[in-house]
Image (cartoon, helix red, strand yellow):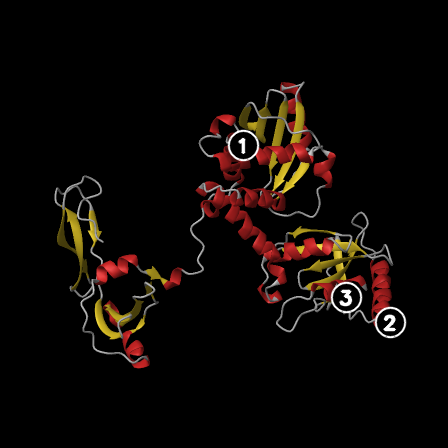
Amino acid sequence: MEPMTCPNCGAGLIEDVWESIQDQEDDGVILDALPVYVCGQKCGYMRQVEVIPQVAAQQGSDRLLLAYPDDQGRILDIRDSVLWPPMPLESLLARGYWEEYNGNHDIERLLDSARDSRAYGLNAPNLFKFATSELSQDAFLCWLMSWSSQLYRSIDRPLHEAAVDFISRIFTVHQIPVPVIESINITRQFQSLDILAIVNQQYAILIEDKTYTKNHSNQLVRYSNAVKAEYPDYIQLPIYYKIADQSHYRSVEQAGYAPFTRRMMLSLLKKGKENGVQNPIFIDYYKHLQQLDDRMMAFRILPIEDWGSYAWQGFYQELKKRIQGDWGYVPKRSGGFWAFWWKSSFDDGYYLQLEEQRLCVKVETKDGDIDKERIECIRNQIMLDSEARGLFLQKPARIRFGETMTIAFRSDYLQRNEDGTIDVNRTIEELRKY
């Protein structure tokens, strides 16, 4: 229903007409007019009057055909209170057995309570779709940990328990008994560390949040040393929080940090939701991570041609469980790609790399020295092996000499099901031949 009072000053609204006049080059004008509500006290508020459609026809007593401007029509299902998408009015009239309308419905009231069928399956607007930076995620983690204080238990017990669960899991991954949380003090950007949480004036939780990036420049060790200098007697619990995936965490673990992954956080958030957390920020973050996880796992259900960067990362994560290799993003001026690489068990002279849908045999130069004779020898042996073992490798049209070179390739290594999706097991068996 249209409000009849001004939301700015509370005065009554009155109907008026808004007009726009545009001059044309031929000295003519275009007049555009709209019915509007305006504030009776002239505070400046103005709102377009929603056009109420007319009933053009009906089907029995449960369905009405509504006529809109521009010759559009929509079907209103009264019984289920559903409004179907717009279509040309004449097309709708030609499709059904419509009768002349003889009712007396309050169309404005029916539309006010009807559900738009186009909204089915839509994801509600999510805060974290727009708050994508690491600082936004830092804020969520600080907010969540703040709820672990016993003072907040009576305000929202399920959320308090979820916060305690998060901190408890940090203690658990470090194999330290979980204390009763008597106090928690949280600092953001402590000596460039994303989050520092002091628990019970005894424990220092260090959280380095890497949403989509990776650690670099020995920064993790520097953060630990900075905290130790400030709190020399506190027990450190360093966490490397990562919602996207990366190939490995070797340097992270060497620095004394425990990875806290998206899957770990999803498990915690799901448990909190099942235990009754209804806070919209908490639920939005849960849905945000679940949608990211769905995109990572999309390689299992989407045709290969429809894979995006997340699907390739998910596929490489699955490969890494069965083939000893690493994966990451390869930047190029002409456009980068996600790659998975591993050493051949037959020869140290080359390695294999998946460049999304293409399998490549690569050679690295030694100290920038390009030995064309050596490269040609390796390629000839590879082509002989390929023919003998049915590897279906081809020679590139030409070799682009550089630090790394593709000397053979195959463009159809991915094994597909009939519907165009990947057969993961057959694909891995195919790759193991190499």
Give residue 388's mark.
Answer: 2
Residue 191 in sight from this viewpoint? no
Task: Specify the quadrant of the image occupied by residue 405.
Answer: bottom right
Q: Is residue 299 left or right of residue 185?
A: right
In primary-sequence order, the first of circles 3 and 1 is 1
C-alpha span from label 3 to label 2:
15 Å
Q: Nearer the viewer, residue 376 or 387?
A: 387
Of tags 1 and 2, the one toward the viewer is 1
Give residue 90's mark.
Answer: none
Which residue matches tag 1?
145
Residue sitting at x 51%, y 49%: 287
In the figure, 187 relative to 425: above or below?
above
Residue sitting at x 66%, y 66%: 422
**At numbered mark 3, what does the secondary structure look like: helix, strand or loop?**
helix
Q: Position of residue 201 (x, y in %)?
A: 60, 20
Label 3 with label 2: CB-CB less than 8 Å:
no
Q: Amino acid at mark 3?
A: Glu
Which residue matches tag 3?
430
Task: Specify the quadrant of the image occupied by residue 134.
Answer: top right
Q: Amino acid at mark 2?
A: Ala
C-alpha span from label 1 to label 2:
61 Å
